[in-house]
């Protein structure tokens, strides 16, 4: 997923289920937040992820954060107004103002009613921007006047505006999710229990070694049936994320359903910060070098990837597998793509004005390129998709797996002043050579290979097996 913060360079980001944008995979219950799909046949989702400095100019200088007490007056209407103006002024396709405010009112009214507030008549929205915002604001202030804390009403309004655009890179993050995204992006892991989740109900697809989940005996293939007593049978990763994450040192209780075990398994874990290695490498049987990259973190992955591949050369390994499955993206890393592409446009995107913006390789290609397979799946998103598209279109790697997330764009992610954040799509990506759209489409593998839930539960990895088989047939 791409991110932008005030005073920073552009970045990427993306999550396998709805997800919001994430088709989301929760790393240590990390996922990015939640976004709606882009209208493609499969719903792109964001995953909460990370970033690295890009060659694009820095944004405007950050301004001092307003006094929270001022922002929270009248139910926090000033925060909603800020979010509305950002969407109206910055979203890649200028949105309809009344539609945004209508979505905000419907969600806010529903939440306020659930909290016992008296809901007035919906504001009249005429299409006059200033008048519509004034009418919405006046009605909102009346509606929240009796509530001691209008936080949930405010969050519902902003989330609904973002979701109404059905864009995987435009979404609202509550304070917990916002903190998680920032920590993940900086490579600091996240406060959670150390699992990756996918599907509905939540399926454990990875348990981080040494994490609270690992120490408690959670296994890959476990289904989460309940979280602190709340039924998780209809939850996806995003909803589970909200319940599993929390303050460091607090506890969370899970009820698990394990294949082959009839009785549910109850485990209680204390949340703590989990920082899995972002780049892992090993030599597979047959002398093939394998590297997994979890995210495109701040600071970049180029140096770590170069070191891992260089170490393979020292061991006489001449064939590589690079695994970016379930990599949600993060910060655009031109250096990482340039390791495999000597010259040419490696990143292409367009902004609100429709004009293409190109970034070329920096000339720091690896001294020796080897036969390479790139593993991708539906959880491969944002910057990871940009990386995959470049290596595929320049024939630097043979791509195996499932079509990627289709959530490839730039997000301007900024705090709203109350701990929450709003991400707004400002640019979308295209194939660097072909110019084909990536957002809403994804990268289609050269060799499609599925990995099912049954495979995960059984510990099978047909995608990795296909990569090995392909390289065994290639002369090194």
Image (cartoon, grey):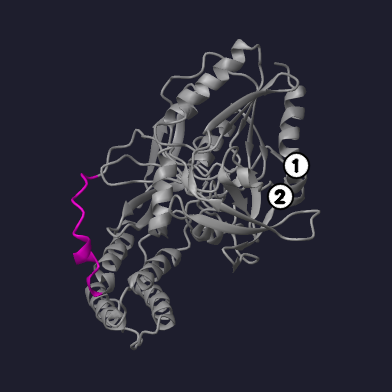
Q: Quadrant of residue 465?
A: top right
Q: List x then y, in percent, for residue 113.
A: 41, 83
Distance between mark 1 and mark 2 Cα atoms: 8 Å
Q: List x then y, in percent, for residue 210.
A: 58, 38
Q: Which residue is mark 1?
A: 459
Q: Quadrant of residue 103?
A: bottom left
Is 231 situated left or right of 86 in this image? right
Q: Residue at point 62% right, 64% down?
A: 232
- Which mark is first along the chain, 2 or 1? 2
Q: List x then y, in percent, for residue 145.
A: 27, 81
Query: In terms of secondary structure, where does tag 1 sit?
Result: loop
Residue 445 visible at all: yes
**Residue nearest the observer in this picture, 373 or 184:** 184
Is 17 situated left or right of 79 in this image? right
Residue 221 marker: 2
Query: In terms of secondary structure, where does tag 2 sit?
Result: loop
**Position above or below: 294 against 32:** above
Local crowd size for mark 1, using a 10 Å CA cut-off: few (<14), some (14–19), many (≥20): few
Q: Mark 1 touching mark 2, by CB under 8 A? A: yes
**Position above or below: 188 against 427:** above
**Residue nearest the observer in this picture, 90 or 156:** 156
* Quadrant, the C terminus: top right
Residue 67 highlighted magenta (yes or no): yes
Q: List x then y, in percent, for residue 231.
A: 62, 68
Local crowd size for mark 2, using a 10 Å CA cut-off: few (<14), some (14–19), many (≥20): many
**Residue nearest the observer in this picture, 55 or 320:** 320
- Read off the magenta span: 60-74
**Position above or below: 116 against 107:** below
């Amino acid at each position: 997923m791409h991110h932008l913060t005030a005073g920073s360079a552009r970045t990427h980001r993306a999550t396998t289920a709805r997800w919001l944008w994430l088709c989301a995979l929760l790393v240590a219950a990390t996922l990015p937040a939640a976004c709606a799909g882009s209208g493609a046949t499969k719903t792109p989702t964001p995953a909460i992820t990370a970033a690295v400095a890009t060659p694009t100019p820095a944004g405007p200088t950050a301004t001092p954060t307003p006094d929270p007490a001022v922002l929270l007056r009248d139910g926090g209407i000033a925060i909603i107004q800020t979010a509305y103006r950002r969407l109206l002024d910055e979203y890649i396709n200028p949105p309809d103002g009344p539609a945004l405010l209508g979505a905000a009112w419907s969600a806010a009214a529903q939440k306020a009613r659930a909290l016992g507030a008296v809901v007035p008549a919906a504001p009249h929205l005429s299409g006059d921007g200033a008048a519509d915002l004034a009418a919405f604001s006046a009605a909102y202030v009346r509606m929240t006047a009796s509530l001691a804390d209008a936080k949930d009403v405010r969050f519902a309004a902003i989330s609904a505006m973002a979701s109404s655009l059905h864009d995987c890179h435009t979404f609202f993050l509550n304070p917990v999710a916002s903190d998680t995204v920032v920590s993940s992006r900086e490579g600091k892991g996240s406060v959670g229990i150390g699992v990756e989740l996918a599907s509905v109900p939540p399926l454990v697809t990875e348990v981080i070694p040494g994490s609270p989940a690992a120490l408690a005996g959670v296994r890959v293939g476990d289904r989460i049936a309940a979280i602190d007593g709340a039924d998780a049978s209809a939850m996806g990763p995003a909803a589970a994320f909200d319940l599993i994450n929390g303050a460091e040192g607090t506890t969370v209780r899970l009820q698990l359903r394990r294949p082959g075990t009839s009785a549910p398994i109850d485990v209680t874990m204390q949340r703590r910060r989990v920082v899995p290695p972002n780049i892992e490498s090993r030599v597979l049987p047959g002398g093939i070098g394998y590297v997994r990259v979890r995210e495109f973190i701040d600071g970049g992955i180029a140096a770590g990837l170069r070191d891992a591949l260089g170490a393979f050369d020292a061991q006489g390994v001449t064939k590589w597998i690079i695994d970016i499955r379930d990599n949600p993206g993060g910060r655009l890393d031109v250096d990482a793509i340039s390791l495999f592409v000597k010259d040419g446009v490696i990143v292409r995107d367009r902004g609100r004005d429709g004009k293409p913006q190109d970034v070329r390789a920096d000339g720091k290609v690896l001294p020796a390129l080897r036969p390479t397979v790139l593993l991708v799946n539906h959880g491969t998103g944002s910057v990871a998709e940009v990386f995959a598209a470049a290596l595929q279109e320049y024939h630097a790697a043979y791509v195996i797996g499932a079509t990627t997330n289709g959530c490839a764009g730039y997000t301007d992610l900024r705090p709203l002043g109350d701990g929450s954040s709003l991400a707004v799509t400002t640019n979308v990506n295209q194939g660097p050579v072909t110019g084909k759209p990536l957002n809403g489409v994804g990268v289609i593998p050269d060799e499609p290979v599925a990995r099912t839930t049954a495979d995960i539960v059984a510990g099978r990895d047909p995608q990795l097996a296909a990569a090995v088989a392909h390289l065994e047939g290639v002369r090194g």
